[in-house]
Image (spheres, rainbow, N blue to C red):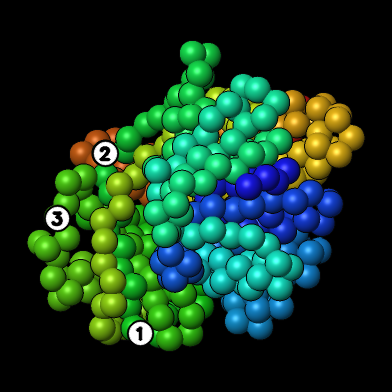
Amino acid sequence: MRTQVAIVGAGPAGLLLSELLQRHGVESIVVESRTREHVEARVRAGILEHSSVELLTEIGLDQNLRAHGQRHHGIYLQWPGSRIHLDFQQLIGRSVWLYGQTELTTDLGRARDAAGQQIIYQVSDTSVVDHHSDHPAVILTDADGTPRRIDAEVVVGCDGSFGPCRDAATDPTTRRYQRLLPYSWLGVLAQVAPSTDELIYSWHPRGFALHSMRSAAVSRLYLQVPNQTKIEDWSDDRIWSELATRLEAGEPGWTLHDGPILEKSVLPMHSFVMEPLRSGRLFLAGDAGHIVPPTGAKGLNLAIADVARLAPALATMIINDDHVAADAYSDQALQRVWRCTEFSVRMTQMLHIDDDRFRGRLQQAQLRWLASSTTAARELAQNYAGLPIGFTDD
């Protein structure tokens, strides 16, 4: 098999990259280790930044988003006895959209089907070879057990943190920066209408809590828990009781509605950035190259920004033999990655408790400053609602 760009990973990053490449006149083949049903059913991020929505609108893939998504003009921040609303629209003239990654992946998959995109699901034994030459390739075994080789001009790893591309892109000069945080999130998906119109981020002396949502009938909620927490130690009743304690403390008289829990899991919190996001003719995008704590809602949006920058760069490289933009991709993308990582870590540290009582008082002072300072609130809004797709700090 032969193509111009071989894309490993059929999540939103890989599918969007194939869409953008086609619009630039570049062919691609996408390969994925999971089934299509599994990929489209994965519950992941649900917040789309302003610039991500602008891109989807520009390429005509915003119809379902606008029909079924929820536009949010801000977020709530709270601590015991206080709840404030940061109105992004009023502060900076931008908003965010709540639209699940599952829905976005389905939309992208249907668009690629309509365009005749070749996507090979359920592959195994995937590896990238010869990426330091001008003729890289992806070797795999398909669902029928047949060995295959895809020869390409470029390979792009959109296969997340556990795929083969991150390790394949590791050279002697590669630098890996990572930090494991001393707590995790216990997340639940519940069949109950949200008790809030926009997300609530709650600081509480018992730990952080977040009230999000997936639709008008389904809520997504999170609790800060210690690392190594076992999900079987948390009954549904215990989860709802702890959520109510942490979320109801911010506004007297406000009540958290409970309901059947559909899913629950424990998510470790960590940050990871790999430099550079390239090794020869193998490029990385999204979680393959970087992971951020979910507090700042940046993971999916960083993946979108990566491929939006990478697609035109690869097109110029392949069609015009002009490597300038492709050579600049990693450095420029990493500027946005580090800016978003700093914001995500700062949000996380502001809202999550530990045994340091001094730090707890500093956190409360920081929250009160956001409530009283328009400048501080505007800075948070600018980072949360999202930087321009092409952001650099030069």
**In which image quadrant can residue 86 be found?**
bottom right
Please state the horizontal and vertical placement of residue 94, each as a whole percent of the image: 72, 61
Q: In front: mark 3 or mark 1? A: 3
Q: Which residue is mark 2?
A: 182
Numbered badge on residue 192 = 1
Find numbered disc 3 in the image and state the secondary structure of the residue it sits on: loop
Q: In front: mark 3 or mark 2? A: 3
Q: Nearer the viewer, residue 45 or 342?
A: 45
Tag 3: amino acid = Lys
**Classed neighbour count for the residue bearing mark 3: other residues with Cα under 10 Å, few (<14), some (14–19), many (≥20):** few
Tag 1: amino acid = Val
**Classed neighbour count for the residue bearing mark 2: other residues with Cα under 10 Å, few (<14), some (14–19), many (≥20):** some
Q: Nearer the viewer, residue 281 or 20?
A: 281
From the viewer's perspective, is residue 197 above or below residue 274? Answer: below
Tag 2: amino acid = Pro
Q: Is residue 213 left or right of residue 243?
A: right
Q: From this viewpoint, is residue 209 visible?
A: yes
Q: Is residue 163 left or right of residue 352?
A: right
Q: Which residue is mark 3?
A: 230
Find numbered disc 2 in the image and state the secondary structure of the residue it sits on: strand
Q: From this viewpoint, is residue 72 visible?
A: no
Q: Is residue 123 left or right of residue 192?
A: right
Q: Residue at x 70, y 46 (%)?
A: 3
From the viewer's perspective, is residue 81 above or below residue 68? Answer: above
Please state the horizontal and vertical placement of residue 314, each as a whole percent of the image: 76, 39
Q: Residue at x 36, y 79 (%)?
A: 254
